[in-house]
Image (cartoon, rainbow, N blue to C red):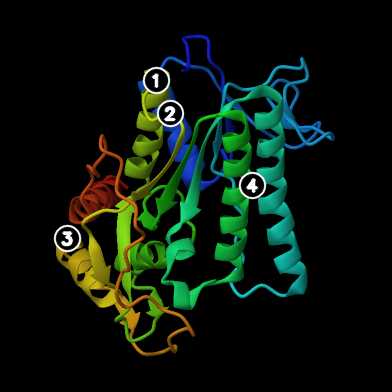
């Protein structure tokens, strides 16, 4: 149980989900939140020390660690693969060590691709490393009787520009920028990043009320599953603009998702997405139009 003096440590605060979580957390809760950085990088907040612990320079441990750090490289070469492995597992080891030392609670995020059908596993090196990292943290939580909640994430939109398909689509609607794409039959399950952040905030509140204690895995899956072609059509209707998509310009990757599989997990009982994609697009381009008229 987290009391009113609990201190929350956040890994990955500069990422899209991490920054959204920090914003929602500060707006909706009373707890202080401290950013976890590298050794000696930050003077006041928590760091991963040379001993592999998440600890302040005053020797304090966080009561709860939110792990939203990540390191993803598509089609990595040998050196990139090593960096991805060492970074993701290095963070998991530091969290594990801190659980063993202080018994802190942990909330983290995984990827849907870790839970593909058995005959397709591992989906990628990235998904395999993420599975290994989850096992490291889960083992420590089990040893110490600590709380550990892991959220399985699908695709998201909104927040920072990460050059993903939705970001490119928005640019195309705005400026006519051409997007080279596959034939567009693969599917995405999309949730606004603020809704994902809200699920994490709600889980902190649940822990503060001694609910959802122990080990839990939830998925954060919306009702919005569409093909790329359907997504473009919805965005065009909502914005009143045309996207410049060059369908079929690039081949499908070796592995594409054309139908979502079941992970075996359910959404958390106290959460559902609030933001609708078409509403998001309408509001975004309404603001863009107003700004354009002002200038």
Give residue 98's position: percent from left, percent from top: 69, 30
**Which of the marked residues, 3 or 2, is nearer the chain's N terminus?**
2
Which image quadrant for residue 11?
Answer: top right
Look at 30% across and 67% down and name the residue there: 173
Which mark, residue 264? none
**Helix or strand or loop: what does disc 4 sit on?**
helix
Write down the residue under mark 4.
136
Which of 33/211 is in front? 211
Give residue 25's position: percent from left, percent from top: 42, 27
**Which of the marked residues, 1 or 4, is nearer the chain's N terminus?**
4
Look at 43% across and 68% down and name the residue there: 116
**Helix or strand or loop: what does disc 3 sit on?**
helix
Labels 4 & 3 near each other (Cβ < 8 A)? no
Which of 100/237 is in front? 100
Give residue 156's position: percent from left, percent from top: 37, 55
Please, is residue 32 above or below residue 233 in the view? above
Labels 2 & 1 near each other (Cβ < 8 A)? yes
Write down the residue under mark 2.
213
Few, some or many residues within 10 Å of mark 2 (<14, 14–19, 20+): some
Which of 61/13 is in front? 61
Give residue 117's position: percent from left, percent from top: 41, 72
Q: Distance between the Cα atoms at labels 1 and 4?
A: 24 Å
Q: Distance between the Cα atoms at labels 2 and 4?
A: 18 Å
Write down the residue under mark 1.
210
Q: Distance between the Cα atoms at labels 2 and 1?
A: 6 Å
């Amino acid at each position: 149980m987290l009391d009113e003096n609990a201190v929350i440590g956040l890994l990955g605060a500069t990422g899209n989900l991490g920054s959204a979580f920090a914003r929602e957390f500060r707006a909706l809760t009373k707890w202080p939140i401290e950013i976890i950085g590298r050794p000696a990088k930050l003077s006041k907040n928590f760091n991963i020390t040379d001993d592999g612990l998440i600890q302040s320079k005053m020797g304090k441990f966080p009561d709860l660690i939110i792990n939203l750090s990540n390191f993803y490289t598509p089609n990595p070469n040998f050196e990139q693969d090593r960096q991805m492995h060492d970074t993701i597992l290095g963070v998991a080891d530091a969290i594990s060590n801190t659980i063993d030392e202080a018994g802190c609670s942990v909330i983290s995020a995984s990827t849907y691709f870790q839970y593909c059908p058995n005959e397709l596993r591992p989906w990628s090196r990235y998904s395999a490393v993420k599975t290994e990292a989850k096992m490291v943290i889960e083992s420590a939580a089990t040893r110490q009787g600590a709380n550990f909640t892991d959220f399985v994430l699908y695709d998201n939109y909104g927040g920072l520009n990460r050059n993903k398909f939705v970001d490119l689509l928005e640019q195309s609607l705005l400026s006519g920028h051409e997007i080279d794409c596959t034939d567009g039959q693969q599917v995405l399950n999309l949730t606004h990043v603020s809704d994902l952040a809200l699920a994490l905030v709600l889980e902190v509140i649940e822990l503060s009320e001694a609910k959802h204690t122990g080990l839990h895995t939830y998925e954060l899956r919306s009702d919005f599953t569409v093909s790329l072609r359907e997504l473009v059509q919805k965005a065009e209707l909502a914005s009143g603009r045309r996207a410049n998509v060059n369908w079929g310009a690039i081949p499908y990757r070796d592995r594409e998702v054309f139908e979502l599989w079941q992970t075996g997990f359910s959404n958390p009982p106290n959460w559902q997405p609030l933001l609708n994609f078409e509403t998001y697009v309408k509001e975004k381009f309404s603001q863009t139009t107003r700004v354009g008229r002002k200038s």
